[in-house]
Image (cartoon, coloured by chain):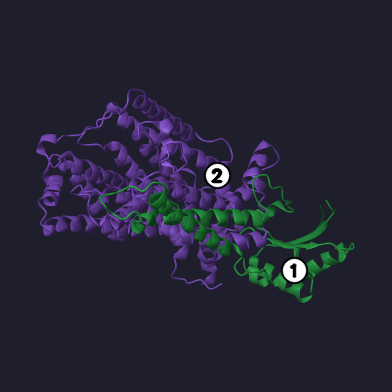
Amino acid sequence: MYVSPVREPLISGEKSYSKVTEDIYAPMTGKPGKLWFGGLTLALIALGFGLFSIFITVWDGIGTWGLDRTIGWGWGITNFVWWVGIGHAGTFISAILLLFRQKWRTSINRSAEAMTIFAVMCAGLFPLIHMGRLPLGFFIFPYPNTRDVWVNFNSPLLWDVFAISTYLTVSLLFWYMGLIPDIGTIRDRLKNGIQKKIYAFLSFGWTGSARHWARHESMSLILAGLAAPLVLSVHTIVSFDFATSVIPGWHTTIFPPYFVSGAVFSGFAMVLTLMIITRKAINLEDYITKAHLESMNKIIIATGSIVGIAYITELFIAWYSGVVYEQYAFVNRAFGPYWWAYWIMMTCNVITPQLFWIKKIRRSFAATFVISIFVNIGMWFERFVIIVTSLHRDFLPSSWSMYSPTWVEVGIYIGTFGLFFTLFFLFIRFFPVIAIAEVKSVLKTSSEKFIKKGK
Amino acid sequence: MQEKAFVSGYYLDDKDLVEGIRALQEKDIEIADVRTPFPVHGLDKVLKYRRSRLPRAGFVAGAFGAAIGFGFQAWVFTEAWPLNFGGKPFLSVPSFIPVTFELTVLMAAFALVFGFLISSKLGPGADNVIFDEEVTNDRFQILLEVSNGNSEQLQSELQSAGAEGVKHHDV
């Protein structure tokens, strides 16, 4: 096979097919380290605290939160939008990059998609809790009922229900279908015993038959084709929650593309933060290389710049519209009582990603790690700014108010971190973190061994 | 179940596998199955498999999802429970699009995934015979079905087609 000598190898080291299996299977064998147990314990403590906070919210009522009549959406919805945003990287990587035939996707799609699923689970919790009565959560689905009413299909909040549940389901199916060949690989590495039986069950009887592969390929391609617009639709619909309202600062047509790029931006940042630690912790440095880092950082520059342009466009349009309410909303964001949130957002989202124009920085793991954390913080503040600063100064100055979260709201947020990391720690222990079969399929065109031979 | 027997041989490279298959095909030997650790590009054409009907199943299910999604919303807001939103039309097509789209994707995805699992006879609890556990690692295996006790002959055919580790399996 012809390999261009200018292409940087995506898999370094002299890897054969069986070496790939061995390397990716290795972290699943032996006793888990102290780091893993420590991390899992910490995550479980956070999860427990979150559950306690949810209990307090349900038991005592929503009055335990810092919301009031002016500010009806605080940390709850901020965190919801933030987590959904983070959940946009995985399916973006596995669907859109599959359609664009980006080979570097093979090393990161599995774990990124796992993060997507976990993040969407965390996100879904917030609207449920926000509704106040958890056991009545099923009211959001259209089902025949004795009250003879239906849900309101004209409401963006209901579109959210459909978008997010579809997104979670399709991502889960896509992820699991990609996993079964690799679970088959794990099953065949294990000697007899209960573990082998469990993996045999989870592998759905995978044999590696050429017929199955042909169908698997055709299914994956079409699923990717469906998932690509789905990813874009989810945050578009989340942005409709704001854009279809009449609140100055929310009622803008720029929201859908701006939210989608912000979502991919924050999602990639979260994937980078975690992958940089994971590759070190479980020795996958040969599979997640500087070439991967650079490709991901390029997408961060692109989406980060779109977000930056959107901020400036918003300001310009507020001025250009001539609407005093709109103008005031933006002046208030930048120079009102929440000015610090606005400037944290601006610094973290507009300035820091521009550092990636420098090649040395975008190829440095340490620098990327730091910048990715800045982006995560910045994107959280973006949602906070959009929600809280737009609401806190109402049309009537008599109802102006200030908002700060109570420990219960903070506790629920910490709890979602607990949930996310508990699932993530279990995932890296019990499932192959890198798509084994997919990496093998690009070995001949993208690994160091074959590129050298090609010369 | 009927007793069956197979002969297997493996290759360590996908290129050798394809050459081996071609050699067997020239002698008109029927290949029962080929098993590989990853999808080998173009293998389905070499083996002359029919094009998968999954895309069609996905399209039909997607169209069904779209029809159900749109039809149901239209029925709710014109027949079952018409609500007046500031004098806007009951049949407000643009606001039905998001839910229609989501249902289209959902139904198509279900059809693709379950279609794949059912047509491949894969699923929780499926107990397929695995002839060589190294197939999911680095071996590309050809399986030939034995009929009328021609096992020996098939084994030598596989060997002459360049296969390694030729073996007989009773199922």
> What element does badge 1 sit on?
loop
Query: Badge 2: few (under 14), some or many (20 or more) residues near its Cα, within 10 Å?
Result: many
What's the colour of chain B in the image?
A: green
> Would you say A436 lies left or right of A123 here?
right
Q: Residue at x 27, y 48 (%)?
A: A242
Compare residues A240 and A347 and report the one nearer the observer. Answer: A240
Q: Residue at x 53, y 73 (%)?
A: A2
Circle 2: element type = loop
Residue beneath disc 2? A431
The residue depicted at 64 percent of the width and 59 percent of the height is: A212
Residue found at the far front of this picture: B79
Residue at 36% x, 23% y: name it.
Answer: A59
Can residue A14 be seen by looking at this rendering? Answer: no
Question: At which x and y percent is residue A404?
Answer: 22, 32
Q: In the rendering, at what x and y percent does residue B61 appear?
A: 54, 58
Amino acid carrying mark 2 in the image: Phe
Q: Chain of mark 1?
A: B
Which numbered marker is on residue A70? none
Q: Colour of chain A?
A: purple
Q: CA distance from mark 2 to mark 1?
A: 35 Å
Q: Is residue B152 visible?
A: yes
How far across and down, in percent of the image, does residue B87 sit?
A: 26, 52
The front one of A147 and B3 is: A147
Question: Which three-letter amino acid code belongs to the residue tagged 1?
Answer: Gly
**Which residue in the protein does label 1 denote?**
B162
Residue A103, horizontal then vertical, whole percent: 48, 62
Indicate left or right for A378 with A177 as reference: left
Q: Image check: A28 left or right of A87?
A: right
Q: Chain of mark 2?
A: A
| Of the pair A93 and A274, the residue shown nearer to us | A93
Q: Quadrant of residue A323?
A: bottom left
